[in-house]
Image (cartoon, grey):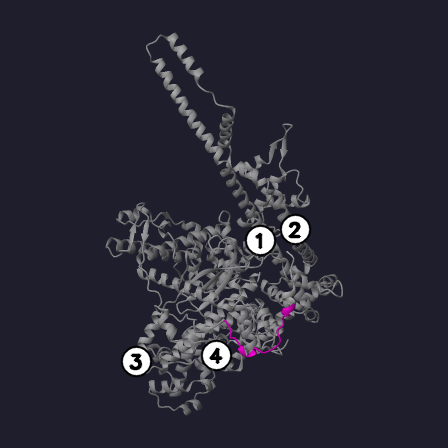
Amino acid sequence: MSRIKLLQSSEIKIFDSPPVFNHEHRLQFFLINEFIEMKLRKFRTPYSKLGFILQLGYFKWVGRFFEIRNFHKQDIHYLIENMSLSLTFAEFQIYYTKQIAYYHREQILDLCRWKPFEEVIFRYQIKRLVERQLMPRKVLFEIQSFLYRTQMEAPAYDKYLKIINQTLLEVGKDISTSLEQQLNEEHRKILDGFLEKAHAHLNADLIQYRTINQSMRPKDIEKSLEQFKILKSKLELLKVPVQALRLSDAIIDYHAYWASIAKVDKIQHHSDRYLFLICFLIHQVRKRHDFFIDILLQNVKLAHNFTKRLQKESYFQNHKQRTAATQLLIETRISYHKQLQKVKIIIHSSIDDSQKVIAIQELLETEIALETEQLQKIAVLEKEMNNDPQSQYYLLWEKRSTWLSNRVGAILRNMVFSQHSDQGLLSAVEQYTLKNGRINAPAKDITWLDSQQQDLLYTLGENGKEKFRPRLYKMFLFTAVENGIKSGIINFQHSYRYRFLEEYLIDKNEWILNRDNLLKDAGLVHFTEFKTVIEGLKIHLEELYHDTNENMKAGKNEYFTFNRKRKPLITTPPVEKPDTEKVSAYFRPVRYISILSLLSEVEKAAPFLHFFGHQSKTDEKKRPNPETFFAAILALGCNIGIERMGRISKGVQLTNLKHTADWYLTEQALQDANDTIISVKNSLDLPQVHRKDPEQLHTASDGQKILIKKDSLNATYSTKYPGCSKASSINTAIDERFATYYSAVITAADREAGNVPDMHLGNPVIKSTIHSTDTHGGTEVIFGIMHFLEIFFAPRIKDLGTLDLYSFLPRKYYQDLGYDLLPDHYINEKLIEDNWEEMLRLVVSLKLGKTTAFQVLKRMNSYAKQNPLQKAFKEFGRIIRSSFILRYYDDLELRQSVEKQLSHIEMMNRFAKSVFFGNNQEFTVATKSEQEKGILCRRFIQNAIILWNYLYLSDLLTKVESEEQREDMIAIIRNGTAVAWQHINLLGEYDFKIITNEKLRFNLKKIFEWKYKY
């Protein structure tokens, strides 16, 4: 393996140089307090005092030491003057030796309570990161962050370079050696089969397995299932080596992606071809398994919806007959009432009894009896009234058996279930599989059916004997499996998204052995003791109840009231929207700058192209030129498409464009490029004018629906928007300075809340302190997790007053204080305490990158009935949500800040649509990974435009001579926004020079002579 460069030469120079301080930094980091003054008195020479303060200041900023020759001259002069030292710059360089510097470093570490660099820990952490298959450059920055977080001295660049390269080599060798030992000739033959051709004119088998047909049509499902069965059988034959290798998801994902885009001959001649092929096989089986589980879930849901619709239609179809029968009953009732009145009159008359009897008999004989048809109408109505709606539903449900069996029957027979599943239900599935779907009797264990369903399995036949209903039984089985998957009692092997919940978390044994270290690594030490945490929350919640109610009583909250049902009502005065027109006026002189020129300028201001390394992790001999990278980013980010961009562009070849998009534009590289642009923008002073509080950073997120043209399981029907078409939802997050720092693609049916914690986990450039979403982004569990992340979660919740409030104290306690805003329920403190360790284990798993919040929450959120962890997180979240609601009611400034930030993200969504203009702003790719890459490119273009705008405005400000004019301009920018794109030419340029006098390509004579006979 060739030696990998982590940084470019210019970056290495910056990396190994002390931080560049401005005046404010020098005041802060070179501050000499009384304690440091005492230290300095022990030094006899001025150069020792100066060197100590210099090293201390640099260390406090970045957590590492630097070579003396790299100390900044400006800092030395500043300290000489500030400390009144009789010393020159030249004398300092001569007399402040390495020996003195090393001695000072030991004292600084002791003073700051940091640990000296430990190579064993350093190597271990790098190995963990390498095993996650992070790109080498990413490993460097992750380990750098880890060292600072755990307060351990960081080394120079050479140490990173050496150990990361060594670790990459060692991890690769370990896997290769293990693979060599585990694979026998039969295993190799199975894997080599992927690279063979059935016929000379056909592609290798590997090619046909790269793409999954995402159609839900029965014929397409059948074809896909055949491929799945072949792959599953291959994996079963490789079961022993796969289990022995214990490959991580990251290793599998990286090598599988490589195998899915590399040319077959390249794989064939690669020394690690068996590793690539075995990972490809595992990945394909998992992806396809999840794909078929999705199909089962969607089709069972479709069948339920169709049956409900039929039931409704049947009800409304009989509406006329039901109305007529009801009217007949009413008329009959009136007639009988009149008849009864006449009988009463006769009875109370003065005639004798014998005449009364005769008169009553005559009256009854003259009444008209109901006709047969009328009696039938009443009988039908009576029958319908006595019918059980559920039984009627099951009759219709049973009729969908053939339709549903054709779509999911074969899928169910080929699923690979986990041992952590309901055994009764698994035995029923096993029977269904053995019988090949031809069921003539129920399984022995039918406890997975409720009593009503068990009774409905049999009906009376014509001979009066009980008759089994196999079609209804199969429908019950399909539904039970669907519910089991959603409720967590059914789990799967060979899956990414439907595993047993425990498999997503840090192993329990590892947690027990290394709990304290794991908490420290995750930065969660202060959550270690439950009692300490809960006592703090009790005090805080009680204070909020008091403050909010006291302010109401004092008339300080004019926007709060109660409705007639005594439910809270809160109003918020509208916030002033950004004045975009005045800011846009500053860009008029540059209309219209091409997006290509803009990206080129941004690359010079914030170099990002070096992030796009080849997937092989080694330097590519022939690297694409910048223009090709720009073209690929624009093709994906503007939704033009690689193929079309290659056809309509000059100066770039289609083959190079495809190669660049596949091998260089990885999701990780695009994320790093986005982070770099955001980081450079954040280092500017101008964007800070949009921050309300320099100590706080308010972020927000929202979802945006995008239609999908192709069959895709990462899309669902959305009734809210856009109508009845299939769509995906793009969940995006921004900060106050208009940095779009996160994006994720989910289905339109998925709740956006699951992404909220992921927006802040492992984010190196945006450190949010408060985050807002709309109603769909907030759940009790999210409130709880965000508290662990130390981010104040402040969503804008519709009908906030309908939500219950919780307290540790009884309702009567607050009533006795004369308060109106009262708790509705107690907090179940014991439930939280009993599950505190598991809650910590889950959050540590999230913070250390073991899993994503979206993945684990989607699995956990369906566990409410079975899983106490879900219940505990909800209960904990109720504390945090109650605190938020009370503060939200009482704090007008908070409410307006939330409104403002959410209005900003709505504006960013409009900006995103303008950038994503191609193909009618609809996805033309089916898989989640392709969609994610396109949205990452779109986000990159947005961030690049905003950075360019800030650079342009900052440049204008430097040219303004009048202080008054400068302040006016800053005020306009503060009240406006840098989210402007009218001056950017996103659509390309027309070249009229290519119009020539070439002969018309059409033969007009033949065209007009041709006639079609209608």
Q: Amino acid at mark 1?
A: Asp
Q: Is residue 731 magenta?
A: no
Q: Quadrant of residue 502?
A: bottom right
Q: Quadrant of the N terminus?
A: bottom right
Q: Are marks 2 and 4 in contact (CB under 8 Å)?
A: no
- 17 relative to 818 in the view: left or right: right
Identify the element where label 2 is drawn.
loop
Judge by depth and name the residue closer to the eye, 375 or 229: 375
Give the distance between the C-alpha atoms of the residues marked 2 and 3, in whole angstroms.
74 Å
Q: Amino acid at mark 2?
A: Asn
Callout 1 secondary element: helix
Q: Give the extent of the magenta segment.
A: 987-1005
- Residue 241 in the image, given as x and y percentages of width and height: 68, 61
Q: Position of residue 462 (x, y in %)?
A: 64, 29
- Nearer-N-terminus badge (4/3): 4
Q: Quadrant of the C terminus?
A: bottom right
Q: Secondary structure at mark 4?
A: helix
Q: On the image, numbered disc 1 is attached to which residue? A: 294
Can you identify the residue that label 3 sits on?
963
Residue at 51%, 34% in the rendered image? 388
Residue 213 to residue 395: above or below = below
**Residue position marked by numbered label 4 in the rendering:** 601
Q: Main secondary structure of the magenta part?
A: loop
Q: CA distance from mark 2 to mark 4?
A: 55 Å
Image coordinates of residue 745 in percent, x first then y, are 51, 61
Going by the numbered disc 3, the residue's amino acid type is Glu
Marks 3/1: CA distance?
62 Å
Residue 150 visible in the shown view: no
Q: Which residue is mark 2?
A: 414
Upstream in the sequence, badge 1 or badge 2? 1
